[in-house]
């Protein structure tokens, strides 16, 4: 429970956690480690590592190894499938894509990866993963029946089902690089539905206003990936998000 407890304590203390998502397939491991270091200097609370395509094997292991030399915040796997497990991470979002049509993304990849999670001693954090329109690459790869942006009650129903399954975290995902983040009405409805559960929101959060709006609507944790990858000054960009979401 170490990483989960660490995150939950930050929610209690600051109101909201900032997570930086790094896709190991997007740059060389050395650059990923530099981005992680700058993100921590900017005030990010933990680094998520993963992606839908190519975030596995040697590139994943090397990225984590180099990162861990540079940073002291937790590293959390955000796997696209069972190949996204690495022994060098501290924790894993052990997630089921509840609104997928494909059983592989609901439970089969999880079953194939679970023995490795145990063998490597990585902390599993049980999470319901819900993909909202437009969904981006992960929506296509995961064959998600995308949650309509105008139907917060559907997202809330899936989130409630996840919490009844015992998932302590819910991740509302608009897809990496989405034009707009998950609507605030949906964030609010899901937070209301899951009560003591923790809500992560990501996809399309590019500036302080969008991050602040998600936090205000009920997000316990905000994820930013593309905005950080695109930033000339990673440290300043992260500091912008962090100051917008922390009370
Ligand atoms: C993707 O929610 C994350 O899984 C982050 O999205 O790249 O749009 O920040 P962005």
Image (cartoon, rainbow, N blue to C red):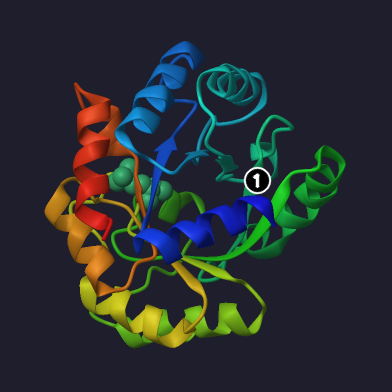
Residue positioned 59% across, 42% down in the render: 77
Residue 174 seen by the camera:
yes
Q: Is residue 159 above or below residue 171?
A: below
Circle 1: is it few (<14), some (14-19), or many (20+) Cα within 10 Å? many
**Closest to the observer, 147 or 245:** 245
Q: Position of residue 37 (x, y in %)?
A: 41, 23
The answer to which quarter of the image holds residue 106 is bottom right
Q: For this view, does 138 lie left or right of residue 217?
A: right
Residue positioned 43% across, 87% down in the render: 193
Q: Position of residue 46 (x, y in %)?
A: 48, 42
Count the numbered circles shown: 1
Q: Is mark 1 within 8 Å of ligand 1?
A: no
**Closest to the observer, 42 or 209:** 42
Q: Position of residue 239 (x, y in %)?
A: 24, 38
> In the rendered image, which quarter contains the C terminus?
bottom left
**Closest to the observer, 148 or 247:** 247
Q: Position of residue 181 (x, y in %)?
A: 24, 59
Q: For this view, does 48 lie left or right of residue 37?
A: right
Most distant residue in the left direction: 209
Residue 176 seen by the camera:
no
Q: Is residue 67 above or below residue 197?
A: above
Q: Is residue 207 above or below residue 133?
A: above
| Residue of label 1 | 91
Residue positioned 39% across, 79% down in the render: 191
Residue positioned 31% across, 52% down in the render: 203
SS type, badge 1? strand
> In the rendered image, which quarter contains the N terminus?
bottom right
């Amino acid at each position: 429970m170490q990483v989960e407890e660490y995150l939950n304590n930050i929610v209690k203390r600051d109101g909201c956690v900032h997570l930086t998502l790094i896709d190991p397939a997007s740059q060389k491991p050395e650059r990923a480690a530099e981005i992680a270091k700058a993100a921590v200097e900017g005030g990010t609370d933990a680094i998520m590592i993963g992606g839908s395509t190519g975030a596995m094997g040697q590139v994943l292991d090397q990225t984590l190894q180099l990162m861990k030399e540079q940073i002291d915040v937790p590293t959390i796997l955000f796997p696209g499938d069972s190949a996204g497990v690495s022994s060098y991470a501290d924790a894993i979002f052990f997630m089921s894509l509840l609104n997928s049509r494909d059983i592989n993304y609901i439970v089969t990849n999880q079953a194939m990866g679970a023995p490795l999670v145990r063998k490597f001693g990585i902390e599993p954090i049980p999470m319901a993963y819900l993909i909202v329109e437009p969904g981006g690459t992960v929506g296509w790869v995961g064959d998600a029946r995308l949650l309509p942006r105008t139907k917060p009650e559907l997202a809330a129903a899936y989130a409630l089902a996840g919490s009844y399954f015992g998932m302590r975290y819910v991740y509302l995902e608009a897809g990496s690089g989405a034009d707009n983040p998950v609507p605030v009405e949906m964030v609010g409805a899901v937070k209301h539905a899951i009560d003591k559960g923790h809500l992560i929101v990501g996809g399309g959060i590019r500036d302080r206003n969008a991050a602040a709006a998600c936090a205000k609507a009920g997000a316990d944790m905000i994820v930013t990936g593309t905005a950080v990858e695109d930033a000339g000054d990673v440290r300043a960009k992260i500091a912008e998000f962090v100051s917008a979401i922390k009370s």
